[in-house]
Each structure stands twice: as C-alpha cells, then as structure tokens.
Image: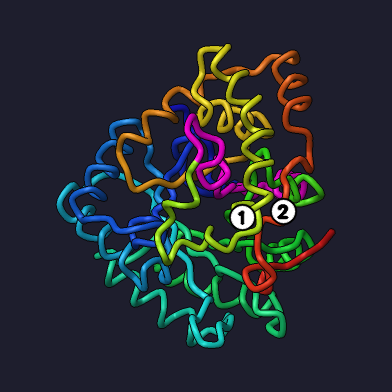
Amino acid sequence: MIKRKLGANGPDVGAIGLGCMSFGGVFGATTEADSFACLDAALEAGIDFLDTANIYGAGRSEEVLGKWLASRKPKVAIATKASIVNGPPRSIRNDAPHLRAELDASLKRLGRDHVELFYIHRHQPDMPIEEVAGTMSRLIEEGKIGGWGMSEVAPWTLRRGHAVCPVTAVQSEYSLWTRLPELGMIRTCAELGVAFVPFSPVARGMLSDAPPDPAGFAGNDFRRTNPRFVAPNYAENVRMIDGFRAFARSRGWTTASAALAWVLDRGEHLIPIPATRIAAHLAEWRGAETIRLTDEDRAEIDRLLPAGFAHGDRYSDEQASTVERYC
C-alpha cells in the first residue's frame, strides 16, 4: 500500500484507510468473527489507518477493535471521535469535561493508553473553536492523543482552530456524488498542511459493482430515510451511476476502485476511509491506489458524473442539522 502523511506532523499511513462504523451494527447485524475477518483482510491489504467513534453502535465498534488489537497486536493508527450525544434530543458537546470523559471511555474500550487522532465529531455552535483547540492541545501534551481533528466543519472553523493548535486532519463526506469540500475545504487543508479524510468515498455503497437495494436495508440503517436512497431519487442515481460502472469495467477496474482512484487523484493529502463489515468487499478496493487516471479518464468521468449529478440531498434535514454549512 502506498503511504500518505496523516497531517504535517502525523504518521505515514496507507493511502486508503478503513471506516469501522459498520462494526457497530449500524448498517445491519454483524458478528465479532466477521468483523475480525474484515480487519484481518484490511491489514493484509496494507490498510493501517482505522477510523471509529464512540457512538458507533454505542461503543460496540471500539470494543470490537479493542479485542482485535489485543489479539493481533498490529502496528496501526487509530482515529476516534466524540461530541455527539444521542438523545432524544441529539446534542453536541465540545466542552473539556465531556471530551475528556469520552476519550477515557474510548481508550478503555480500545485497550490503549492513547490514539493517534482524536476528532470532535461535530462542532458545538456556541463553543468557540479556540477553546476546543486548547483542550486538544492539553490532551496532546498529556500523551493521550497524537493529534486532533474535526469532522464536517467549515474552512473558517479549521483556520481558527489551527491557529491555536495545529490540526492533524479534517474529515468530511466526499466522493463523486458529494462534492462540497471542493468549495474551500480541500484547498484550505492543503494550504495548512492538514490531511483531508473523505468518508463514504464510494457513496455509501452506490459506487460499487452492485448497488445496494433499499428493500434490504436493516431497520436501523439510516439510508432508509436518506433522500438519495428513496424514490424517485434512488432510481435516477442508479441510472446515472450505471454509465460510470460500464466505464470502470471497460478499463478493467472495479467500480469502487475507480471511485477511490478518483478521490486519491484530487490531492496527495487525501486519505479516504471506505467502510465495510464484510471482508469480501475489500477485494473491490484492491489496487485503487495504483490506478493513474489520464486526462481522458478524468474528462470521461466528469462527463458521466458531473458535479451535482446526484438526485436528492446527502442528508435529511435532521441528519444535516449538526453539520457546518459554508456554501
């Protein structure tokens, strides 16, 4: 696996990481054995950057990771997050006591005394980001975290926080069907030496050889109410992406590897974290980091899936309520 830098002062990690949300059962039932098999396959593929959060399955994802880490003792970089407090109603907390308590709980579940990266999962609107940066700076000094990051924030929030304590990474949704970070965030990260970590780079399974069937979604799968997966949007999105699938097939690539190659091509500071709970799905990603897109490839992808092609918003109004909007 080709390596990329996790922020200016962070470790070198594989160019593609692994999102571990589904180990918590968020997208359907899973077993510890299946999760271990997926993690083993990821490690074999050279994936050594694992992303989780305290709310993924109410701590279940971290618990599974902790057991796997204890049994395998791999050399990997771990990122986790805190700030979202499930309700009702759901709220966001960035205050120091909350972040410290949640980090301690995460470290206990992970079986570690530190993590390489600790994000605020969302920015609390009435909490100055400078105060959050101060808290993170102290956690770095204490050796509990190697660096800090933010998820789903605006470029101005990044700049203000970075001025107090250098930020390691910003995480946001980014893929061929979600392009907002192109309007400032990717450029700002490059300017400041901050890694940009796209989550859902294969569009929550849509940019794969076989698109997911909403009829088979588990009852707790948030895609059931996601605008892009409900009628009539879903059918239109499948129709649009079918052309991209044919293009990838004509080039000898899987759809997912082509989608990941496109993300990696957007900048050397991008480290996408596709997610799965099934080891076999990892095979669809193999070789993505070795694909070199030509100008002709880029033009054809832009023709097939131009910016803004997706039908429906990426989140429902409720899901989007805690995301910082800047365009």
Vertical placement of residue 52 versus 244, above or below? below
**Residues at discs 1 and 2 in contact (Cβ within 8 Å):** yes
Q: Position of residue 159 (x, y in %)?
A: 75, 61
Amino acid type, label 1 = Val
Q: Position of residue 251 (x, y in %)?
A: 57, 12
Q: Kindly identify the residue that appears in the image at 41 percent across and 65 percent down.
A: 219
Residue placed most toward the observer, 137 or 82: 82
Q: Position of residue 181 (x, y in %)?
A: 73, 49
Judging by the rendered image, the residue that carries numbered circle 2 is 312
Amino acid type, label 2 = Gly
Judging by the rendered image, the residue that carries numbered circle 1 is 230
110 part of magenta stretch: no
Task: Choose top left, top right, bottom left or bottom right for residue 272.
Answer: top right
Vertical placement of residue 325 versus 280, above or below? below
Residue placed most toward the observer, 218 or 117: 218
Residue placed most toward the observer, 35 or 93: 35
Vertical placement of residue 219 versus 239, above or below? below
210 part of magenta stretch: yes
Q: Identify the element where label 1 is drawn.
A: loop
In which quadrant will I find the C terminus? bottom right
- In the image, the segment drawn in magenta is 186-211
State the CA–CA distance, disc 1 to disc 2.
9 Å
Q: Identify the element where label 2 is drawn.
A: loop
Q: Does residue 143 appear in the picture of this structure?
A: no
Q: How many circles with numbers are drawn on the protein?
A: 2
